[in-house]
Image: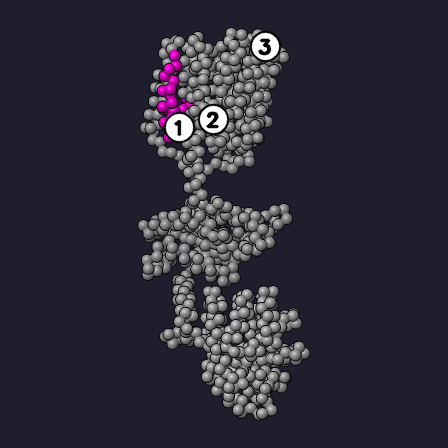
Amino acid sequence: MVVVYLVVWALLDVVAAQFEADDGVSVWYPPPGLDLAVLLVLGVRWWPLLVASSALHVLVISPDQMGPLADVLYVVITAGGYSLAAMVLLRVLRIDPRLPTQRDVVWLVTIAAGAAALLVCAARVMLLTAVGVAQDRSLVLSIAGSWAGSATGITMLTPVLLLAARRWVRGRDGEWPAAWTTRPPLEKATPHTRSRLEKAAQAVVLLAAVWLAYSGAPGRSLDYTYLVYAPLLWIAVRGGLPAAAGAVLAANVLAVLLAGEQAAPVDGGIALQFGLVTLSVAGLLLGAQVSQRRRDLEEHRHASMHDALTGLANRALFDDRLAAAMASSRADAGHEVGMLFCDLDNFKQVNDSLGHAAGDQVLVEVARRLTAAVRAGDTVARVGGDEFALILDGVGDGATLPEVAAEVTSALAQPHRVDSVHDRVVVTVSVGSASSRDVVTTEDGEPAGSSLMRDADLALHRAKSDGRARHVAFDSAMHASALGRLSSESALRRALDDGEITVVYQPIVDLTDGRVVAAEALARWTTPSGEEVPPARFTALAEAMGLISALGRQVRARAVADAATWDAVGQPRLSLNVSGAELSEPDLVEGLLQLLDEAGLSPSSVAVEITETVLVGNAPVCADNLAALAGAGVHVVVDDFGTGFSSFVYLRRLPVSMLKVDRSFVDGLPEDRQDSAIVRAILAMATELELPVVAEGITTTAQQDFLLEHGCTLGQGYLHGRPGNSASLVSAAWASRSAAPASCTGGPAS
């Protein structure tokens, strides 16, 4: 490479010497253009090449007998000046030597062709004048002529070589030159369409304009040089910087060949030199501006179609490519389109524990692995925060959806290196897949692409509900289930709006005498068609839809209104179930107390029932509300005791006033030894804590006898009454109190 550089440099120097406007001053001097290109491509550390080429000039090509010291100074001035210019451009201004932006070109022209060339030429001319080599012209004209020749050489040759280096770099399999190692690959901009005919016409017009401007008899003025600007403008506007740089080079070479020797005798070549400098700079800047404009438009287009963080296709580009793929599938029955929906499992934990910067690193790596797991023609898109979608156009040609899904889950399961401390971050993925062969088309004519996305999304939800970190393929049953769920959700909203939710009451009795001492309010839903929806089903649906609070408010309002009419039977205590979502609401306490006040009920006549699981899982959130309720006189009851975490911490710290033993333990009494042991243990603990206990689900006298034998005096179940409306409860309460012995009136739960 060193030999090639020196040979080319020497040839350029010799050719330039044939067009001298004065001693040591060439009309056109390209060697500095080669010097700057070499340093900008290979790096400033290659400055010894400039020392070698400058020494070659003063010792071999143009030995002016300046003396050893002057020769050394000449070499230092030339090599040092252009090396300093390259250092400023690369390390201070940090231009991209591939010249992708207008800024890069402007700084190249300003620093290299302007400041550096002027300083180097001025120093060299003054050195040549001092040693008596340059004497024919004034110092100013000599400096101007020398600078113009070097500036022309830089502007016409350096950009062409730098642009050519883009292709050279791209063809070296990733072996980037030293000066470009830290720069990302350039996105290939969409070229402006120029036909071969247009390019040929541009070349002919350029050659004709240069011929008219620079050919003719010796001494002819250069009045027609402006003609060259017409084709140059055409080429620059249509082709951008690469085309403009090529046109500048061609125009300069042809102009010098036609007029270089003829112009010198008349005016020393100054007019020709400054004409060429102006032509070169104008062409380059116009071409750079056009290229910058195209780059900005391309970046805007890319940004509008790609995710800013990962560089993957965004939803807009994803939809466009999906529509094209599905169109191909409809045109060719054998053309199958597959889709994978991927959702990272528990990704929020990465952001919460390591920070969003670490989360972004993981997302970028996930995008890279997904892209590597599919074929080049497939589309990988980021469609949500941690959701990705893959379009496999023509799946089945060498790969199947399960195979690709397995590749994806395996690739993403490998640990991620976030930093030196957290280098084993593992993020699994849930994957749902669907194929165009199995698309379920809706009656409303939903586009096939949307149907495919819907099916893949349904499969993804199934994968997550089945335990995550797995792949599930879509089947038609999922669609039927989704339609059923949608129908149920719509029906529940209508039920809440139209008052279809009713309230029934299951009595809680004193097991010693059968007296009704309390009643648990239970929600019931009967549809207009007469179907009774199981409570567990619609309460779970309400929680999933975010309607559990609205449901709870309706039930509480009706139950409190009914309880206000129970004075005639001694006001049994009203038990209200409160969900975890409601317990964490800041206005729960105020709303309930206001409801009781409007109904004329004492807070002590009401209990709130909270499941053990909700109590443990939301203890920090619900503690204040529970304390406020207890402080107002409302009783706090732990429902389904024994089925959750069975932590005794909250029994000591929170204002719990009663426990309810879950029916699953009562069912096996008294025959089941394990159930019997658990119930005895709960009752013994409650006795020590002085907490009353209600046994749920009592259906036989044997169960009741066992409970009474071991100290449980309160219970509820079908043995003592099924859930009924308020009137039924009043009747049952009246009957129980009439039948109860006088000594038992006012039992432990009244």
Q: Tell me residue 596's x, y (percent).
A: 52, 75
Residue 159 image label: 2
Could you tell me which quadrant the C terminus lies in?
Answer: bottom right
Q: Quadrant of residue 743?
A: bottom right
Q: Secondary structure at mark 2?
A: helix
Residue bearing the label numbered 3:
130
Q: Residue furthest right?
A: 688
Label 3 near label 2: C-beta < 8 Å?
A: no
* Front label number (2 vs 3): 3
Relative depth, front residue between 367 and 132: 132
* Front label number (1 vs 3): 3
* Labels 2 and 3: the sequence-earlier one: 3
Check disc 1 and give the amino acid type.
Answer: Ala
Question: Majority secondary structure of the magenta segment?
Answer: helix
Check disc 3 and give the amino acid type.
Answer: Ala
Magenta residue check for 449 = no
Q: Which residues are magenta?
A: 221-250
Residue bearing the label numbered 1:
236
Q: Tell me residue 689's x, y (percent).
A: 66, 77
Could you tell me which quadrant the N terminus lies in?
Answer: top right
